Image: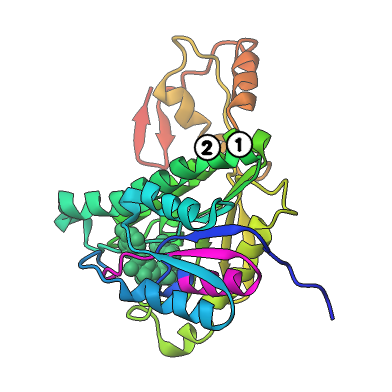
Amino acid sequence: MAEQLRFDGQVVVVTGAGGGLGKAYCLFFGSRGASVVVNDLGASFKGEGNSTKAADVVVNEIKAAGGKAVANYDSVENGDKIIETAIKEFGRIDILINNAGILRDISFKNMKDEDWDLIFKVHVKGSYKTARAAWPYFRKQKFGRVINTASAAGLFGNFGQANYSAAKLGMVGFTETLAKEGLKYNIISNVIAPIAASRMTETVMPPDLLALMKPEWVVPLVAVLVHKNNTSETGSIFEVGGGHVAKLRWERSSGLLLKADESYTPGAIIKKWDQVTDFSNPQYPTGPNDFLALLEESLKLGPNDPGEKVDFKGRVALV
Ligand code: NAI
């Protein structure tokens, strides 16, 4: 039989682990030799209320199967306390899975500050607080693995989710920076946009589709990314669910480069709009350095054609 991917002797913290994806991660890592901190506030999917039951059920299930686990009931807004539990109970922290999440879906027209703020507190501040508290341990031991959780709503936008999509794209930038700062210390950070049947999706998707999207089908990718053998795949975005795994990346059009002087008018851009939006020869930037090279190129260009009476998509004539 093939050898298992194991996590013996390692300590994994999973936030929002009382149900859905978080529970699936915990049961997996608990069965593969890791000690697991099962965090869950026990709130409703809108972030209301709290209960110790959600985390306790998962801890008991891991223990009943012979694994090691401890519960933590803090909100991720106090993520340092969750990491404290890992250190106090197991003496270390190796893997952090920022998974806790809530929804406050509402049309943008009706959105209130409270809907916006609560989403940011749980997703963005929560992921910051746990990662920030784990960071010194990761650096010192020259080992750390982080998974942050984005969403298709963050990558592409979605009706009624202006708050959630802004917070979820925030997870991408956060991960990309942690990846850059952590690499030297063997701290590997990736971000996933999962899709899975859970209480978050069960009201918006039909049962036959939900049956194909078990939370368990998100776990294998996460296991691969946080394993000690992964020392190079970092700062990446993955779409994962129902057996599908794909990496996503930023794509830049071939672009328009003009002389930046007084001839750089709206009309000069409109005239060459096709170049701005031409993806036939794309680039895949991972940082601002190649942009600086472009600036040097622009110094060599001659004055622009101001594009007098240029038509922008047949509607406006501008200079
Ligand atoms: P879920 O509602 O089953 O799990 C989220 C858990 O987070 C709950 O157990 C909840 O009690 C806990 N939680 C909420 N606020 C918390 C707080 N302040 N502190 C600690 N725990 C808290 O939902 P699901 O689907 O398992 O979601 C997990 C993550 O995946 C979330 O970040 C969600 O936004 C994300 N996601 C899920 C998708 C899906 O298709 N299920 C799609 C895209 C993203």
Residue under label 1, please give it: 140
Q: Residue at x 42, y 25 (%)?
A: 267
- Quadrant, the C terminus: top left
Q: Residues within 10 Å of mark 1 (few under 14, many from 20)?
A: few
Q: Residue at x 41, y 75 (%)?
A: 19
Q: Is residue 43 magenta?
A: yes
Residue at the image point whose x is 46% and y is 17% from the top? 264
Residue wearing tag 2: 136
Q: Is residue 270 left or right of residue 46?
A: right
* Amino acid, disc 2: Pro
Q: Quadrant of the N terminus?
A: bottom right
Q: What range is drawn magenta here? A: 23-45
Q: Position of residue 309 (x, y in %)?
A: 40, 26
Dot 2 alpha-carbon crowd within 10 angstroms: few under 14, some 14 to 19, many 20 or more: few
Establish if 296 lies above or below 95. above
Q: Is residue 276 above or below residue 146?
A: above
Q: Residue at x 46, y 83 (%)?
A: 210
Question: Which numbered tag is attached to residue 248?
Answer: none
Q: Is residue 120 magenta?
A: no
